[in-house]
Image (tube, grey):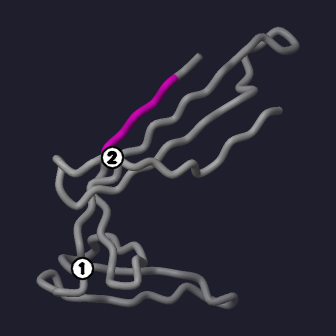
Amino acid sequence: MAMYERMLNIYRDKEHRPYRIKAERFRHQYHNGKEWVSEWLPWDSPEITRYYQILLSLRLTGDEYGKEEDYMGLDLEAELVKLDDTLEFEILSHDVI
């Protein structure tokens, strides 16, 4: 069994689209079917909210054909505006192979 956890800062606009910091500005990048498109906002934009993103991943592993394989997993994600906010998790994916 393996368990991973991480905490990241994630930035989102009022429509909850993700932004990353690039060249001291916020950039939202997406593919429109033909090419990558970038939308930029200034560093001090009131449109951007910083969230703390916590991701917990649990993987169950077992021996298959002589090597350890992942056969079941559970991912839990929470996004908080303040670190003392109540945690609410959304199940992103679950699978059994």
What residue is rendered at 71% in x and 26% in y?
70
Q: Is residue 27 above or below residue 37?
A: above
What residue is rendered at 22% in x and 51% in y?
85
Q: What's the residue type where badge 2 is placed?
A: Leu
Q: What's the residue type where badge 1 is placed?
A: Ile
Q: Secondary structure at mark 2?
A: loop
The x and y percentages for residue 59 are 61, 27
Q: Quadrant of the N terminus?
A: top right
What residue is rendered at 22% in x and 80% in y?
25
Which residue bears the numbered disc 2? 87
- Provide the residue span drawn in magenta: 3-7
Pick the front one: 51 or 29: 51
Task: Using the numbered discs, state the Cα–Cα distance from disc 2 to disc 1 in whole angstroms.
Answer: 21 Å
Pick the front one: 59 or 37: 59
Q: Is residue 4 magenta?
A: yes
Instruction: Assign the magenta stretch its main secondary structure.
Output: strand
Query: Would you say 4 lies left or right of 50 here?
Result: right
Q: Is residue 9 above or below residue 94?
A: below
Q: Quadrant of the C terminus?
A: top right
Q: Secondary structure at mark 1?
A: loop
What residue is rendered at 35% in x and 74% in y?
19
Pick the front one: 66 or 49: 49
Contact? badges 2 and 1 (CB < 8 Å): no
Which residue bears the numbered disc 1? 48
Q: Is residue 70 above or below residue 86?
A: above
Q: Which mark is residue 76?
A: none
The crowding category of the residue bearing disc 1, from other C-alpha atoms within 10 Å (few below 14, some 14 to 19, many at least 20), is: many
Query: Would you say 67 lies left or right of 46 here?
Result: right
Q: Is residue 16 magenta?
A: no
Pick the front one: 77 or 31: 77
